[in-house]
Amino acid sequence: MPVVTFDPVKDHKNKAKHRISLDRAKDIDIYQQMPDPDYADRWRAIGTIDGNFYLLVYADIKTMSGIHAISLRALRRKELRRFFRQ
């Protein structure tokens, strides 16, 4: 995984809401990535951390060959079913 940066305030909010730190984005094994339909400069990635599926929202950092993590949360059952039907 490339260099991962994140906003510490956003990380605190992500931990409170989703019970996982944005720092864990560095550990994700990505299976699928796609452009975020809501934001032109963001991407969504589905992958695993410690055997569990997660959705990572991030922006590319062109100057550092890395990503800026925006959100990280467990994949919902409905999303998992959709992912495996593809």
Image (cartoon, rainbow, N blue to C red):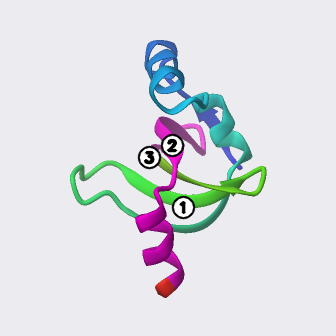
Q: Residues within 10 Å of mark 2 (few under 14, many from 20)?
A: some
Asked if residue 2 is positioned above or below residue 44 in the image, the reply reads above
Q: Amino acid at mark 2?
A: Arg
> Which one is closest to the eye, mark 2 or mark 1?
2
Q: Amino acid at mark 1?
A: Ile
Provide the secondary structure element on which disc 3 rests: strand
Residue 19 image offset from top left, x and y in percent: 57, 29
The structure residue drawn at horizontal position 24% and vertical position 49%, both measured from the top left corner, is 39
Q: Which residues are magenta?
A: 57-84
Sequence-wise first label, 2 or 1: 1
> Which one is closest to the eye, mark 2 or mark 3?
2
Residue identifier under label 2 = 73
Residue identifier under label 1 = 46
The structure residue drawn at horizontal position 48% and vertical position 86%, both measured from the top left corner, is 85
Question: Along the horizontal axis of the image, is 41 left or right of 76?
Answer: left
Q: Please tell me whether residue 58 belongs to the stretch shown in magenta.
A: yes
Return the mark for residue 57.
3
